Amino acid sequence: MLYKTKGVALSYIRYRESSIIAKIYTETFGIQSYIVNGIRSSKSKSNRIALFQPLTLLDLVVYHREKEDTVHRISEIKCYAPFLTVPYDVIKSSLALFMTEILAKTLKEEESNPYLFQFIENSVLYLDAAENKFENFHIQFLIQLASFLGFGIETIQDLENELKSNHYPDALDASEFDATEQLIRHGYGLSVPMNRSQRIRILEKLLFFYKIHMDALGEIKSMEVLREVLK
C-alpha cells in the first residue's frame, strides 16, 4: 500500500551499479530503509541524490509492507524545506554531521513517534535559520534527545551522580556545572559563554552518559571534526 509521510534523511549507501539504499527517519514508520533505483545513473536527468543528503526534510509517498520487509520503496519524494545555510557554513555543517551521526546510532524503533519526529524537524529548522547563538546547539541537542530516548536529564546533579556511579574520571568544574545547568533548563538559542575546552569537556561527559544507556553507541567519529572546527 501507498502511504504519505514526512521523513528526515540520515544516510545512504551505494547499491549495485546505479542505486542506493537510503536510511530515513519517518514520521509514520520510524526508522526505515528504502531502495532507490537508477539514481546514480549517468542517464538520470535530475540530481535526485541531493534529496538524500543528511538531514534533508522530505515529503514522501512510500510503499510499505509488513514489518519484516526491512527495505521498502519510494513512489514520490520532494524536499519541503530546502537548506538556506547549513551546507554553506562550516560550523553549521559540522554540527549537522554530529547530529546525523548521533541520530543514525540512536534511532532504532520502526514505529511512529510524532513527538520525536517533531523535535528532530524543529532542531534541523532551528540550526538552518539561526544567525547567532548556536554555539551550544550540539550540547542542547544531546540533552533534549535523551528525554525522547527514555533517559532524560532532569538536573545537572542527576547527571553528575550517574557519571560518578559509572566511574567517570572527573567532574565538571564550577563554571561548567553552571553552564550545563542552564543548558538543561532552556531551549535552543540561549547564549552561555564557554570556551572550546569547556564545550568539549561537557560534550564528552554527555556522550559517556549516552553510552551508559546505549551500549552500542560506539565511537562518535564526528567529534574530531568538532574539535577542529570549534577551536
Image (spheres, rainbow, N blue to C red):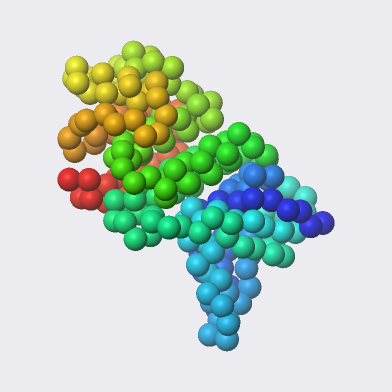
Residue 110 placement (x, y as % from top left): 65, 43
Asked whether residue 101 is in view, the answer is no
Left-right relation of 202 to 209? left
Q: Is residue 77 above or below residue 231?
A: below
Q: Is residue 5 above or below residue 203?
A: below
Quadrant in the rendering for residue 196: top left
Query: Along the line of sight, which residue is nearer the eye, 21 or 8?
Result: 8
Q: Residue at x 37, y 34 (%)?
A: 189
Residue 122 placement (x, y as % from top left): 51, 41
Of all residues, the one furthest to the front in this rendering is: 131
Q: Residue at x 42, y 48 (%)?
A: 129
Asked whether residue 8 is in view, the answer is yes
Left-right relation of 42 to 192? right
Residue 209 placement (x, y as % from top left): 37, 27
Left-right relation of 121 to 176? right
Q: Residue at x 29, y 51 (%)?
A: 91
Q: Residue at x 32, y 19 (%)?
A: 181
Residue 96 placement (x, y as % from top left): 39, 50
Of all residues, the one furthest to the right in this rendering is: 1
Query: Along the line of sight, which residue is nearer the eye, 166 or 59?
Result: 59
